[in-house]
Image (cartoon, helix red, strand yellow):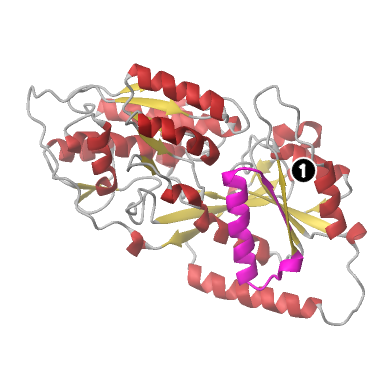
Amino acid sequence: MLVSRGSRAATLVACATFLLATSACGTDKPEEATTQQARLYGTDGNMLNSFPAELKDRADLVDGMKGTTPLTPLPEDFKSRLRSVDPELSDFLYSAETYDAIMISALAAQLAGSTQPEAIAQQIVGVTNGGQRCEDAATCLSLARSGQDIEYRSVSLTRAGFTDAGEPSTASYATLHFDGQQLNDAKTEFVGAGDESAASTKTPPKPRKQREGARTGAPLVIGGLLPKTGELALAYPPMAAAAQLAIKEINAAGGVLGEDVTWIDGDDGTSPAVAKATVARHVEAGVDVIIGAGGSGISLAVLPDVVKAGKILFSPSNTDDGLTKADDKGLYFRTAPPDSLQGRALADVILRDGSQRIAIVARKDSYGEGLQAVVRAELEKAGITTDRIKLLTYNPPEGESAPPVDFATGAKEVKDFGADAVLVIGFAESAQVIRALADAGVQIGH
């Protein structure tokens, strides 16, 4: 169910103000950190069914954990199609965004009448705004082949199109709940965010009708830059399944510019070094559009290489606000919404539980620190004073053989602070942070 942002925000501000006022009444006793229970919260990097396995014998620590992720209510038909690709699929994180990134790229190439990245880039924002509404590969490609301007809507893109910066103007977030060691779908709530008026109104170049036998540079070659390995690998299966599904359905609908689209797999390793090597291979192989990277920091690291090569980088999962203004020469796009929107949703979840002393622990990179700053700002807007918010960071592991995260000192700080809520912003490695919190005596409650 979509919930009004305005009414929810007003209610939360009132609740936060009431809770802060009442907490100061009736007692002058200091808060007892040693007996304080702390609710646990997470984000899109760790709110997955695959995450508890990272805690090994301490998997029960996630019981009661809540968090948010960019997610629309996915149609059962879409889930079924994904499972036809990967029958073992247990999560759907960023599957819709991956599917749509590839679909939009293919439609933009068809409208441009070319596989030249610059020509494709000029059509991408326009594919999502104005024109004839269409929602599936066959219909949209047919319209594009006839030279008809289109407005693509699908699983992740439902309300409004892209902004001038090439990212969603609106988004849907899900509040997720762990019951035991599994996410309880029955408790999932959806809330809309963003502003439809932020969608671009610029007119793209006129679509080119496909001419029989015309030379276009086809086939369109799309390369993956997804986290097959590394700390974000737990999010890879749904993204990989969605990529395969999109390519399959595009080619079943006749392909792009008269030929099947070619997909070249590639790993970002959740590592700048691995990602840069993959980008170099894609450039050498003649890839036109690169889908990825998984993490915002990885995209920031490879973006100069991609731009220098004149290719498109189109991520289904980057959320760092800073990427909106990155020096991309018009070649970077994303279907994932920026963290300015997710930060509000996270603050809403924490405030609804009446939390008053909040520790925000984040991996030390553009994603973690960026989202941490947004959540802090949203909490302060709702009346949580600065002295009741504690910010901590940790260095994420570098590479597969890196030592585990050492958060013992930070965990003690959280305990001494007497936090009644701990938000952990990270990927698979955040399991090591949660273990450290428990080892330090932070009583993780439900």
* Position in image of residue 349 (x %, y %): 63, 60
Q: Which residues are magenta?
A: 359-388
Q: Is residue 17 magenta?
A: no
Q: Residues within 10 Å of mark 1 (few under 14, many from 20)?
A: many
Q: Is residue 356 visible?
A: no
Give the residue at mark 1: 434
Q: Is residue 252 left or right of residue 290?
A: left
Give the structural element (helix, strand or loop) at label 1: helix
- Looking at the rendered image, the quarter that the C terminus falls into is bottom right
Give the number of callouts.
Answer: 1
Horizontally, residue 394 falls left or right of residue 266, namely: right
Residue 125, compared with residue 21, is above or below; it is above
The image position of residue 392, as x and y in percent, is 73, 51
Per the picture, the main secondary structure of the magenta-coloured stretch is helix
Q: Which residue does the image show at 42% across and 30% down from the upper left?
A: 305
Q: Is residue 2 above or below residue 128?
A: below
Task: Please name the residue shown 31% across and 39% down the image.
Answer: 104
